[in-house]
Amino acid sequence: MADQSQALLVQSDLRPAYYDSFQCLAADCRYTCCNKGWTVCFDKKDYMRLKQLKCSPELDATLKRCLRRIKKGPLAEKFYGRFDMTEGCFQREDGLCALQLEQGFDVLPRVCRKFPRAETYPVSGYLERSLSPACEGVLELLWNLPEGVDFVSDPLPREGWRQVLGKELTGLRRHFQDIRSQCIDFLQDRRYTLPQRILLMGLALKELADGERDIPGWLLRAQALADDPETAGLLSGVGGGDGLPLFLTNNIKVLCRIDNKNSEFANVPDELCAALGCEFREETGRAVIPTAPYLAARARYEEQFEGREYFMENLMVTLFFNMLMPELGSGEELWKSYVQFCNLYSFYRLIAVMSCRDGVEDTKAELFRLMVCASRSLIHNMARREQLRDELFQNDSTTLAHMAILLGG
């Protein structure tokens, strides 16, 4: 990695090996990008091309109804236009896109052409390509990777080369690739349960958050920590039953913040709260959550998906890579990104277990439905994600002991 006074010339890409296998499910997709409630935003170039499109009367009427300018609000800072999806917009009854079928793939806004793919030039020194778990086609790929997620790299054609500015390569960011690689090694260390691996990663990252800057020394200690026989004893309490009420309380709060009005996910919070037997006490403003329904669903989850433990591992590795974790701008930002990751795992764990709640017959299909819902509500909504993270800091709930509770469901 270059030192902080130099720019870094990116000449290679980096991606999960399964990236190359992705194919859109097209008409077989149950939760398309055009579903009601899904926000599709784009830049001025895409907006003007759509505005000036010559098309059939039927498609022209749809464009006039759905194509909108973004003139104010937080989205206006990043985007110029959007599709109003309240009526489903271009999606036909067969699930296909009327705009693409009539005008061709290239006329679609860039976000439509790319999703669930993402490309970025971070300080890793690569053009990074990744896939979002907000797509059930991606979840299916993760479901079929029992050996875990591998990563591959290839040289870029010269037109794909780009410089990462030297001012971005300061402090811990100079070592982003080494630090992230070690974190992913933690996440894929199957000597431990997944919650234990995430806490193990936190034990190592806490050093960096507290000011350690000897990265070669830190990498040696991090690996030694994973290999130390005493580590298993140190992590043995993760997943104990004592923290279950707090685990459920925190995640029900996250669940109730999900706003999927006018979408096929609109009823998810009510469905899961009903299955958990949640009650709300007006006098305290707190939810009362019995643990028995969750424990019953968890037992069924472990039975139904026995041998598929790797799926959650693959999901969290994908999220870690896709979201460019950990953030290394400062020790404080690093710890915030770790807390956010724990919060995300905790919520995904809740909805994974609740996919096997009483009354669900096709548990895999329900698992994917809830995973897509969570991903679109949190991974693709930075403001909501950061708000939930910041509330943990406001409540002094960001220690490793608190993370062990979040991870313990």
Image (tube, helix red, strand yellow):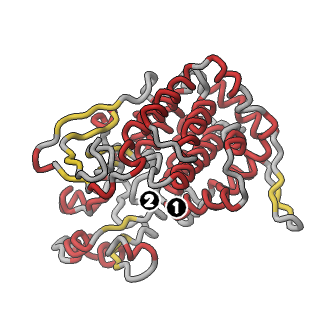
Q: Residue 200, located in which quarter of the rendered image?
A: top right
Q: Which residue lies furthest to the right in this view?
A: 283
Residue 33, numbered label: none
Amino acid type at circle 1 is Ser
Residue 57, image x and y in percent? 23, 75
Please say if the residues under marks 2 and 1 sit with CB atoms less than 8 Å apart. yes
- Residue drawn at point x = 53 percent, y = 39 percent: 365
- Residue drawn at point x = 71 percent, y = 35 percent: 297
Q: Mark 2 points at which residue?
A: 35
Q: What element carries label 1?
A: loop
- Residue drawn at point x = 78 percent, y = 40 percent: 243
Q: Is mark 2 on a helix, strand or loop?
A: loop
Q: Residues within 10 Å of mark 1 (few under 14, many from 20)?
A: some
Q: Which of 219 and 195 is in front in this view?
A: 219
- Residue drawn at point x = 65 percent, y = 56 percent: 254
Residue 131, image x and y in percent? 37, 44
Q: Which of 406 and 209 is in front in this view?
A: 209
Name the image quarter holding the C terminus.
top right
Q: Nearer the viewer, residue 98 or 236?
A: 236
Total marks shown come to: 2
Residue 381, image x and y in percent? 49, 60
Pick whichever of labels 2 and 1 is earlier in the sequence.
2
Amino acid type at circle 2 is Asn
Q: Name the residue under label 1.
A: 263
